[in-house]
Image (cartoon, helix red, strand yellow):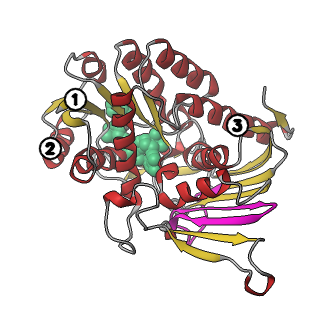
Amino acid sequence: MKTLNIGIIGYKFMGKAHSNAWKTAQYFFDLNIKPVMKVACGRNREQLKEFADNWGWEEIETDWRKMVQRDDVDIVDIATPPNVHHDIAIEAAKAGKHIFCEKPLANSYEEAKEMYEAAEKNGIKHYLNHNYRRCPAVMLAKRLIDEGKIGRIFHWRGAYLQSWIVDPNFPLTWHLRKEIAGSGPQSSINSHNVDLARFLVGEIKSVNAMTAQFIEERPLPDESVSGTFKGAVKGTQKGKVTVEDAAFMLAEFENGAIGSFDSTVFAPGRKNYNYFELYGSRGSLIFDLERMNELQYFSLEDPDYSQGFRTILATEPVHAYIEHWWPPGHIIGWEHEFVHAAVDLLDAIDKDINIEPNFYDGMKGMQVLDAGLKSAETGERIYLE
Ligand SMILES: NC(=O)c1ccc[n+]([C@@H]2O[C@H](COP(=O)([O-])OP(=O)(O)OC[C@H]3O[C@@H](n4cnc5c(N)ncnc54)[C@H](O)[C@@H]3O)[C@@H](O)[C@H]2O)c1
């Protein structure tokens, strides 16, 4: 069987989710290309070694530039914060490596555009990990829309709400520093929401947004503590939060639909509440990630006396990816979306076909997100060019 070697950069939250995906893919799916977990890269040798040993990466490397240039690396997997996505992706594309990149694609539309152009120019396969597209219930929503079951779409109502930094003593991690994260919830979670809306509704024409910052200073983090969301504080010194804590956006789509995008990390009780409602001339859909195996569907074509939202459990073999997992009703989880992404990227390379979302989608999404931030700053409605 043909093999391709993976080189991953970043070994924490996404490093683990991606490692699990590369490892698991081959057990459940009939792959034409076997992924080899060749080399893991990160800056702290000790933590990196522990990660590599745990997940079965064959070798380690502490300089991403060296890793990207290695002849024995075929796919570069970018699992770092967004400030380094651009430079890694450009070098990887120039070196002819395929790329699996975490969202948001970059820290600005300009950076994203350069990444897209470099990827296309060098003829590599590029995947951007808006993993929620690969949830079977979301794929079912797409199918119902494509089959015309929802009709003309009038409204998108998306929300991505979390609560992990409500405590003012949660430290100033990279997510709260503009130079690393680009922006706050707008890029970290509204990026997913915008990607789903582009996938299901269509391109966005104009936006109007508002942002808020609730906590201006936070204690500095203890970087030596490994693991994600540990929130370890170092000493009593504080630093400035330079991103927004919440970003709410309204949008007009090119097809005439209008929609809303709420994103915040200040919603106690909401842990990873990625939720959308979509309303059309023939029916409506509701998805809630925290019940990710389900899709709610309302059809105006049902007889009056039995109309109402029905809950479809998207775990039948007819639902996307499910035939490779468990019997009906044996639900799957968040990490399975990452496995689906790994499988699809390998398939795209094997068949020489496109995979979506890709850097084009990342560039288009980033344009919307940047426009939202600009709107929040100026108070104006921004039309996308
Ligand atoms: N798709 C999703 O559901 C999802 C969820 C969370 C995070 N993300 C995205 O994944 C990316 C990584 O986030 P995370 O939560 O894994 O962060 P994290 O802090 O848990 O891990 C980041 C890793 O990158 C490494 N790193 C940072 N700068 C580096 C550099 N210059 N060179 C080499 N390594 C470097 C860190 O050492 C760490 O190993 C971000 O873009 C984030 O937005 C996606």
Q: Quadrant of residue 154?
A: bottom right
- Ranked by sequence position, the earlier of labels 1 and 2 is 1
Residue 344: x, y in percent?
39, 40
Q: Is residue 173 visible?
A: no
**Which is closer to the viewer, label 1 or label 2?**
1
Query: What residue do we see at 68% from left, 57% from top?
Result: 158
Q: Which residues are magenta?
A: 263-290
Which label is found at residue 368? 3
- Ranked by sequence position, the earlier of labels 3 and 1 is 1
Secondary structure beneath dot 3 equals helix
- Would you call the spot at circle 3 few (<14 residues within 10 Å), some (14-19), or many (20 or more)? many
Residue 58: x, y in percent?
12, 35
- What's the amino acid at mark 3? Val
Query: What residue do we see at 57% from left, 25% from top?
Result: 112
Residue 321: within the magenta? no
Q: Quadrant of residue 208?
A: top right
- What's the amino acid at mark 2? Gly
Q: Is residue 63 above or below residue 236?
A: above
Residue 41: x, y in percent?
25, 31
Question: Quick check: is the Cβ at mark 2 less than 8 Å away from ligand 1?
Answer: no
- Ranked by sequence position, the earlier of labels 2 and 3 is 2
Which label is found at residue 102? none
Residue 64: x, y in percent?
30, 24
Q: Which quarter of the rendered picture does the C terminus lie within?
A: top right
- What's the amino acid at mark 1? Asn
Measured in 3D between alpha carbons, the distance from the residue under mark 3 to the one under mark 1, in whole angstroms, is 34 Å
Name the residue beneath numbered marker 1. 5
**Which is closer to the viewer, label 3 or label 1?**
1
Which label is found at residue 56? 2
Q: Which quarter of the rendered picture does the N terminus lie within?
A: top left
Measured in 3D between alpha carbons, the distance from the residue under mark 2 to the one under mark 3, in whole angstroms, is 39 Å
Secondary structure beneath dot 1 equals strand
